[in-house]
Amino acid sequence: RMMAYSSIGHTGILLMAVLVYQNKESNVLLFYLSIYALMNIAVFIFIDALEASLGNTTIESYRGLGKQFPLLFTSFSIVLIALVGLPPTAGFVGKLLVFSKVFEQYQNFQSFSLLALLLVGALTSVISLFYYFKIPLNAFLRENTGSPAVKFNVLLLCIGILCTVAVLILGIFPDLLLSAF
């Protein structure tokens, strides 16, 4: 359910990118779409793997599993950081590019609606921070009440981890993807 709400917020960011799309400058829109796809592929792989192993997707069921599966939950946490839009991830670069284009349009037209979009976009990012960080909080800082038998699909986890690495690399070197557009 949390990811469904997240999708609504990210759709708003995508619509902001569409709104300021002009002069055939599609690089910001295509960059954000690409990294959003990478982030979602990774996060849903991690959620699916955990649901298949644990039998549910409640955040409380992740208690203490970060110590048991550090690579999985570190990758999961990095993708969540990217979804919030924090550095050094591609999520940060994507949101920065979109917000910069919207602000540029605001400076050109002095439209209150563009300013409102910026403020709402920033507010949703801050709110998402509090929701997303419940996952690493439970995984790494809460004690596990039991030791569930957990088995993961290794191939899917490798794909999720590769997507996570790509999100980090594109956050540090965004021109690798931006130059393709």
Image: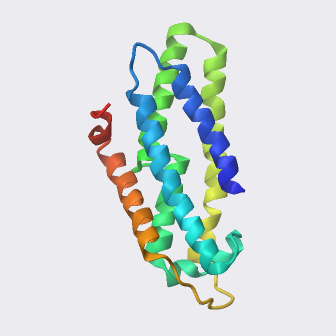
Q: Which residue does the image show at 70% across and 73% down from the upper left? A: 56
Q: Is residue 126 above or below residue 77?
A: above
Q: Nearer the viewer, residue 102 or 25?
A: 25
User: What is the number of callouts on the image?
Assistant: 0
Quarter of the image where the N terminus is located: bottom right
Q: Is residue 19 above or below residue 39?
A: above
Residue 180 placement, left or right of 70: left
Q: Nearer the viewer, residue 19 or 138?
A: 19
Q: Is residue 42 visible?
A: yes
Q: Which residue does the image show at 49% across and 52% down from the upper left? A: 39
Q: Position of residue 165 (x, y in %)?
A: 36, 59
Q: Quadrant of residue 131?
A: bottom right
Q: Which residue does the image show at 67% across and 91% down from the upper left? A: 146
Q: Is residue 63 visible?
A: no
Color scheme of the displayed model: rainbow
Q: Position of residue 124 (x, y in %)?
A: 65, 41
Quarter of the image where the C terminus is located: top left
Q: Position of residue 68 (x, y in %)?
A: 51, 84
- Residue farthest toward the top in the current orientation of the protein: 109
Q: Which residue does the image show at 69% across and 55% down from the upper left? A: 2
Q: Is residue 94 above or below residue 138?
A: above
Q: Quadrant of residue 174?
A: top left
Q: Position of residue 159 (x, y in %)?
A: 41, 64
Q: Is residue 155 above or below residue 33?
A: below
